[in-house]
Image (cartoon, rainbow, N blue to C red):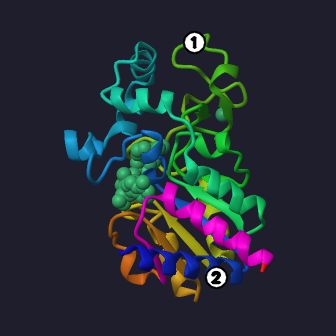
Amino acid sequence: MTAPELEQAIAEAAWQIASANYVVALVGAGLSAESGVPTFRGEGGLWTKYGEPDMRGYERFLKDPAKWWEERISRSSTYRELVTALEEAVPNDGHFALRDLEELGYLKHIITQNIDNLHQTAGSRAITEIHGNRTKLRCISCSQRWPLDEFPMDDMPPHCTNCGGIVKGDTVMFGEPIPRDALNECVEQTRQCDCMLLVGTSAVVYPAAGFPVDVKTSGGRLIEVNPNETPLTDISDVVLRAPAGEALPRVVERLRTMVNE
Ligand code: NAD
Ligand code: ZN
């Protein structure tokens, strides 16, 4: 995409956002790439480098939760590179732009596949985390959540103070069902949405990949923000072929000038 084409697309995106009633952002790992957090797929992605992981993570957890906790505490994760990057990451201009869009009243909700807590750090408020949050724990029976440092680690594996169920990290494992409360919220947000921003997601992970299709089917608009083509490019109304940290602040700027015009 040439510079004038991008400029044109940014103007078009701002116009679509300003004309919509209910804008929702669907966010993927690409938003945090500029914060130094590696993605799974694509160039430099962890799976591209190391191959796809064992998809039975949750099954193994259920078989032996204590072992999973031991590994977690001894930090022997095969995802050392990701864990270190997550610990050091701070929000980038893309996260702050989403916060600005919410503050300006345009963005109603963020559905994020990221687990990195960077939306919260940036100051966004209406957030649903489909894949959980790495700074929290969750009971697998009643879905109660706690901040990591507020949970008593007396027995191994830890048990829920509410219902006695087994407690795990809130991050959704491979093979683990999406927590019902988060999924319900996503369905409700998608139902209301008439303009969805697709930010840094390759949109191949379900159920997230289905939300844009639902928006489109019900007559809404899709705006893709991604330096690379995705399976959703073809059904997107506007495509910003640029990194989120560059494109999103320009959309915000454009919206601010539209208000002042
Ligand atoms: P993905 O890894 O499958 O794909 C990343 C997408 O981001 C690609 O389409 C890529 O082109 C795009 N991208 C790369 N750099 C970008 C940039 N600067 N700006 C905008 N887009 C950019 O990501 P996914 O679709 O979100 O799915 C992977 C799963 O991995 C998610 O479910 C998520 O839970 C998990 N994950 C999370 C984190 C995190 O929390 N930051 C990091 C890695 C993986
Ligand atoms: Zn419980």
| Residue drawn 48% across the image and 52% down it | 31
**Residue drawn at 26 percent across, 40 percent down:** 53
Q: How far apart, in angstroms, are the residues tagged by discs 2 and 1? A: 55 Å
Q: Is residue 8 left or right of residue 2?
A: right
Looking at the image, is 174 positioned above or below residue 5? Answer: above
Residue behind mark 1 = 155
Q: Nearer the viewer, residue 151 or 239?
A: 239
* x and y percentages locating residue 192 in the rendered image: 69, 75
Residue 243 within the magenta-colored segment of the rendering: yes
Query: Which span of residues is magenta-colored?
Result: 237-260
- On the rendered structure, is 16 left or right of 105? left
Which residue is located at x 40 percent, y 38 percent? 58
Circle 2 residue: 15
Side of 24 relative to 55 (left or right): right
53 vs 66, left or right, is left
* The image quadrant in which ligand 2 is located: top right
At label 1, the amino acid type is: Asp
Foreground residue among 52 and 17: 17
Could you say where residue 186 lies in the image, as x and y percent from the top left? 61, 63
Q: Quadrant of the C terminus?
A: bottom right
Indicate which disc residue 120 carries: none
**Secondary structure at numbered mark 1:** loop
* Residue drawn at x 63%, y 57% as measured from the top left: 97
Residue 55 screen position, x and y as percent:
30, 44
Question: Residue 141's image quarter?
Answer: top right
**Local secondary structure at mark 2:** helix
